[in-house]
Image: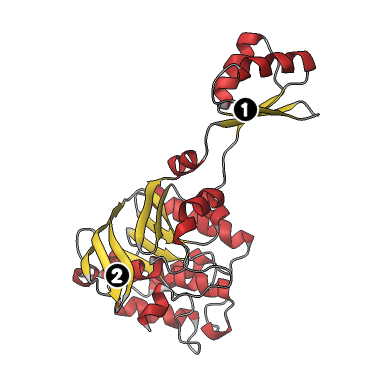
Amino acid sequence: MISLRGLTKRYGDTLAVDELTLDIEAGRVTGFLGPNGAGKSTTMRMILGLDHPTRGRALIAGRPYADLRRPLRVVGAMLDARAVHPARSGRTHLVAQARAGGIPVRRVDEVLETVGLTKAARRPAGTYSLGMSGRLGVAGALLGDPPVLVLDEPVNGLDPDGVRWIRRLVRERAAEGRTVFLSSHLMSEMQLTADHLVVVGRGRLLSDTPMTEFLAAASPASARAVVPDPGERATLVRRLMTADGVSVETSASGELTVEGRTAAEIGDLAHHCRVRLHRLSDVRVSLEQAYMELTARSVEYGAGGSAATDEGARQ
């Protein structure tokens, strides 16, 4: 588990991270979201001991990263997929990491196979595509077979097959009881991958909640139903409209869009009224829609605007 307690980072006049307190628990994939400049990268760097907090603590398995005896065996991380000497082969890069972390070199070939880079292992890393560099970064994170994974934008540059591979990889690791903490700007993929969401804006915690609850909170009860018979359709609409807070829109195809009632409630009412339904489903907002609503006031970058990101504040 990763624990943040009052985690704060200030660069001069810029408050990059503001009193973050949360637990990133084992056994689930926790997605980390926020607009550019929200403090995501700074938070991950403090978890990994690369930046020192102004105040507060970031603990991995109850200890600061710097106090871990064999850190690569406890936490595997990828923050910058391109942070590899371009003249080194992918395999040489991983061998150096393994030796520095006290990990048997035989493990290098195992992780290269896992990430699908065996054939490209002896090529200079500078010739790798962005997707291949990402796979190499994930291989480095997996070297010590750690119980904790911290991955910043692991799907960048990957083709659809690679994106599915990352999704499967992190979900399998979480199912094994490991802690998985990852960021991504691909909302559709995050919705498929993450069990839990942490959302930050301007360095502050905006949400720390399960994915299902996050989406439900952003989506009032709404459903669609297809009623093929015009008479039965009219009957159902009349019954629905007797309740406060319900609105109904109809289409020529016989589809009803009902605000203020769930699919289960409409189904029960239709059964009571002996109305035949051909299709019935809840309407939910996408993660992208829910996220945009939550972070609308926390965006540092806007069209025609300019602001320093948390990375830029360090320079």
Seen in the image, is 109 located left or right of residue 73?
Answer: right
Q: Quadrant of residue 246?
A: top right
Q: From this viewpoint, is residue 265 visible? A: yes
**What kind of residue is marked 2?**
Met
Total marks in image: 2
Figure coloring: secondary structure
Q: Quadrant of residue 255?
A: top right
**What kind of residue is marked 1?**
Ser
* Foreground tag (2 vs 1): 1
Q: Residue at x 60, y 36 (%)?
A: 283
Q: Residue at x 52, y 62 (%)?
A: 185
The residue under label 1 is 247
Location of residue 173 in the rendering, given as x and y in whole percent from the top left corner? 41, 54
Location of residue 156 in the rendering, given as x and y in whole percent from the top left corner? 55, 68
Q: CA distance from mark 2 to mark 1?
A: 49 Å
Nearest to the observer: residue 138 or residue 189: 189
Q: Is residue 138 above or below residue 244?
A: below
Disc 2 element: helix
Q: Within 10 Å of the Cα at label 2, are there few (<14), some (14-19), or many (20+) other Cα atoms?
A: many
The disc placed on residue 46 is 2
Disc 1 element: strand
Q: Quadrant of residue 149?
A: bottom left
Seen in the image, is 5 located left or right of residue 200?
Answer: left
Seen in the image, is 260 located left or right of residue 209?
Answer: right
Q: Is residue 180 above or below residue 157?
A: above
Q: Is residue 113 above or below residue 315?
A: above
Location of residue 294 in the rendering, given as x and y in whole percent from the top left corner? 46, 51
Look at the image and tell me in which quarter the N terminus lies.
Answer: bottom left
Q: Earlier in the sequence, mark 2 or mark 1?
A: 2
Q: Residue at x 58, y 69 (%)?
A: 303
